[in-house]
Amino acid sequence: MNRRFALATLLVSLIAAGTLFAQNPVLINAAGATFPYPIYSKWFDVYHTKYPTIQINYSSVGSGAGISQMLNGTVDFGASDLPMTDEQLGQAKFKILHFPTVIGADVPAYNIPNVTAELNFTQKALAGIYLGTITKWNDPELVNANKGVNLPSSDIIVVHRSDGSGTTFIWTDFLSKVSPDWAGKVGRKSSVNWPVGLGGKGNEGVSGLVKQTPYAIGYVELIYAIQNHMAYGKAQNADGKFVKADLASVTAAAAGAAKAMPDDFRVSITNAPGAASYPISSFTWLLIPAQISDAAKRDAIKGFLKWMLADGQTYNENLSYAQLPKPVIAKEQKAIGLIQ
Amino acid sequence: MDGAAPVQSGPRAFLRRLAHGDEIAHLITLIFAASILLITALLVYQLWLGSAEARHKFGWHFFFTTTWDPVAGDFGALPFIYGTLVTSALALLIAVPLGLGAAIFLAELAPRALSDALAFLIDLLAAVPSVIYGVIGIFIVVPMMRLHIAPFLKAALGFLPLFQGPSYGVGMLTAGIVLAVMVVPFIVSVSREVLLSVPADQREAAMGLGATRWEATWRVVVPFARTGIFGSVFLALARALGETMAVTMVIGNDPKISASLLAPGYSIAAVIANEFSEAIGNLYIHSLVELGLVLFLLTIILNGLARILIIATEQKGSSHA
């Protein structure tokens, strides 16, 4: 009985394996950024259902690990929350193309007892708070931007991310653009040498610290703030307007930057022009080798990119990711032809 | 027994089989033991190889500088070494008396049924994942620290630099307390077993000479079990040194050296876990790997010191007796 059962199982699995091989499944491995992981896994899943022979495995190991795995050839393509630098591209043995996929943003969240108003943060205020030069909630820089709000004289407790993350890159990239002091003393990276503040691990760590500590301020990823119904402040953009982050204002920032989009898509859209642009936003990218020798893989990756730029974008808003602006999509569709 | 003896025996054949079995057992266990050596050697080799750029660039300065600046590419390990040592020391300071006291009660004084039941619970505690301790730390220990413990310490002992400055709830003392809770089960569980394995005649002899129950426990049983108890403390120390998740959730993750225990700090294991996955650039990655090497060295040095401590107290014990 048992033996017959085993034989039958073997036969069935052989047939199953045979049909699979007959269809030539294309298995593609990718690794990288954690921030877009929810939308990527949705995309890869939907794409696999549509084209069952193409399976894309994505491991969210972090942008840095994604880049190094792609450079070492252990994955077919990478994903990163920050564009690769000229130096990194120079070190690579092959040409690498950047494809923006979705847009993310950081928002300032705070916890001031008895203050429920939506605070306005000037660019100077955010830089000063994180540099440690603005230490009290009733600093004139904050009071002048928030008329009618009774700000206390308490010390500001600054919270930042302790783990390396694209969220920190967006935040420090913005501060570097708006404050020469910040650019000179600290700079932009996924982890920096913070002048002040406590470190929380992950969005949940930062928001946990902010919620628990009176008079604290921290920055979290917009999607995290939306999904957890957190209150957050408005940030002043390049036109001097105070803008609240939402999907529309983030897409506006991308559209504002799209006019000056370089051909390789490596562009920072923090402090983007436009009255409606939210200033602390950034693309996240897929990193794709320009030469893919395996024809089946190449076609599958190109096919996926085409689908991602069209149907794929419709899945964004359900998962609270902002859509790419139309001009950027048109430009990317052309760039797909560069993959050979 | 006699009737159940194997049929085709004869003392000589039996001996030969035994000898063969011995040889096989000898070989297999030797391989297993050698594999430990091999794994350790590979670990050191990989850490050494993976930290080459940082070692060349910073040399010994790596151990003594306090800047950790991924943007400028300037890395120093001192704040992390400090944070690791301070939090582990705090953890042991709290956990050793607590754990040893509990172990003595469970082994010597409690009824056997109660002792076994509690020992089961303690083993259960040792199996709780560290992220759970971290979450409990964030939601219970951190607010308690900010609202009650820190104000009390500042009022009572504020003249010491150890308890000055603002308290955010997170900090080195908080990390020490969470770590203490995490390592207590190791001390209790191992110490209890060791105390229970002290031969009864030791205890009986002491009591026969007129010692009270406590005197017999404290002056005869505990010294007899000393090596094993130290072993449990080392195990606890090793866990505290290498703990990542729970520490990073409550320590504040700020690479600064402050005299105050209420101030935030950072530990080696925490910074590696936090920054490794997003680290870009060889020097940055190599510096993180060198931190791993530093942690390894720290563990070796502390273990060596602990062995010396055992030997020292052994001599003292024997001369005393």
Image (cartoon, coloured by chain):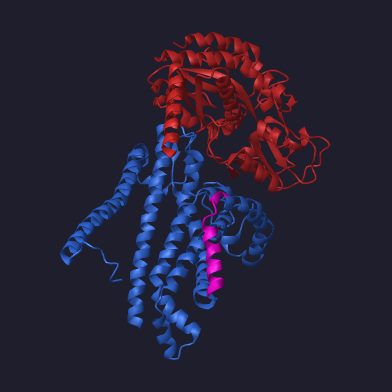
A236 in the magenta segment: no
- Residue A190 drawn above or below residue B239: above
Query: Which quarter of the figure is the C terminus of chain B placed in?
Result: bottom left
Image chain in red: A
Residue A186's image quarter? top right
For the question of whether residue B37 can be seen, the reply is yes
- Residue B198 drawn above or below residue B261: below
**Which one is in front, B208 or A251?**
B208
Residue lying farthest to the right in this orientation: A148
Query: Which quarter of the figure is the N terminus of chain B placed in?
Result: bottom left
A140 relative to B238 in the view: left or right: right
Q: Position of residue B131 (x, y in %)?
A: 56, 49
* Shown colour of chain B: blue
Q: Position of residue A169 (x, y in %)?
A: 56, 31
**Which one is in front, B171 or A62?**
A62
| Residue at the image point whose x is 44% and y is 87% from the top | B207
Q: Which residues are magenta?
A: B112-131
- Residue B291 drawn above or below residue B14: above
The secondary structure that most of the magenta stretch takes on is: helix
- Residue A28 drawn above or below residue A65: above
B10 relative to A142 in the view: left or right: left
